Image: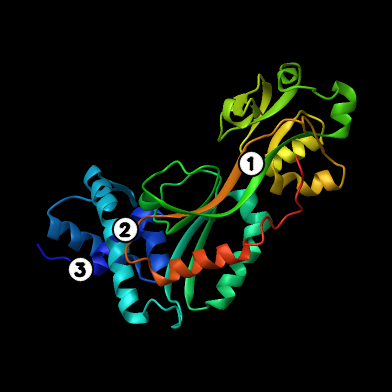
Amino acid sequence: MRYTLDEIETFLSVMEHGTVTAAAAHMNLSKSVVSKRISDLERALQAALFLRNAGRVTPTEAAMRLAEQLRPALSALTAATESAAWGMDGEAPLRGRLAITVPMSFGTLFLSPILARFARAHPKLELRIDYDDRSRDLVRDGFDLAIRIGEARDGALIGRTLCMDQMIACASPDYLALHGHPATPADLANHQVLSYSHMPDAQLWQFEQEGKLIPAPVRSYLTLNNGEAMRDFAHAGLGLAMLPGFIVAKPIADNKLQPVLQGYKTRKMPILAVWPPIMPMPAKLRSLVDHLARELAGGRPWTPVEH
């Protein structure tokens, strides 16, 4: 059984991008070269990796198992060779590729200029940045780093807290003038609230009582999958929203939204950088994490709102 590193990288690229055409474009190769590498790898493994039908390729179960094992192995191999070639002191120019997934709202509102400064400082580094509120599987989806908001849930990842934020319950002045201010979390049962599709209401709408975060009784009829959209719907008077400070700090300062239930503490949200446990840690990844930590060392880059 003989196979090459080029064949493995090409196989993982097809798995990541979904088609031979997309993988070829990403790798700057012809489709015929990509197809031949896949065929050669299948011949070496004596296993079908893709089902072909009308120009489409569908990964087999064997391909999915193989990709799951190869991704961390290839990452470790890349890290080792980069360390040998460039050293771990960070003095040599960073090269290679970094794939990053970041939350949509936080990424577009605050992270983009921070990442742009990193890209400008390292022009030989290829960055892929996906803005997505879903919690992606870093190994399966081929990401080197993720920015997560909230407590870390995957113990298999290494994490570093970049800064903290606070959830804030708020509504528009028009909504509050029409429906009144809730005096306690129990009053939310008589109000319209906005739900976030990536988090159950019982986790989103929590207030501290007797030292514990307790879910509030809420009634929602609008569910959205993006924090900025929730902010806009709240501004339109369609209900109360529970949102991170980085989304609502400016509209609260502009009196477009008003915080409610300020006597009750809400959930604190760590903003984390997380990555798979690759040893040695690639210099390019360590440099990015250090850059993010420095940029956010002074705390939240948005106007703080006392809650």
Q: Residue, x 25% and y 45% (percent of image)?
A: 60
Q: What colour scheme has been applied to the protein in the rendered image?
A: rainbow
Which numbered marker is on residue 226?
Answer: 1
Tag 3 residue = 4
- Label 1 to label 2: alpha-carbon separation: 30 Å
Q: CA distance from mark 3 to mark 2?
A: 13 Å
Q: Quadrant of residue 82?
A: bottom left
What residue sits 26% from the left and 56% below the top? 70
Three-letter residue code for mark 3: Thr
Which quadrant is home to the C terminus?
top right
How many residues crowd mark 1 within 10 Å: few (<14), some (14–19), many (20+)?
some
Name the N-terminal-most of marks 3 and 2. 3
Residue 73, position as x, y percentages in the image: 26, 60
First in sequence: mark 1 vs mark 2? 2
Is residue 72 rendered to the left or right of residue 138?
left
User: Given the image, on which type of amino acid does mark 1 rest?
Assistant: Asn
**283 sits left or right of 256 in the view:** left
Q: Is residue 221 above or below residue 255?
A: above
> Tag 2: residue type?
Leu
Q: Earlier in the sequence, mark 3 or mark 1?
A: 3
Write down the residue under mark 2: 12
96 versus 251 height, above or below: below
Residue at the far front in the pictured view: 210
Give the structural element (helix, strand or loop) at label 2.
Answer: helix
Q: Which quadrant is the N terminus positioned in?
A: bottom left
The residue nearer to you, when weighing 224 against 184, is 184
What's the residue at 47%, 74% (across, down)? 125
Work out how far the residue at label 3 is from the one at label 1, CA to CA, in angstroms.
43 Å
**In which image quadrant can residue 4 be found?**
bottom left
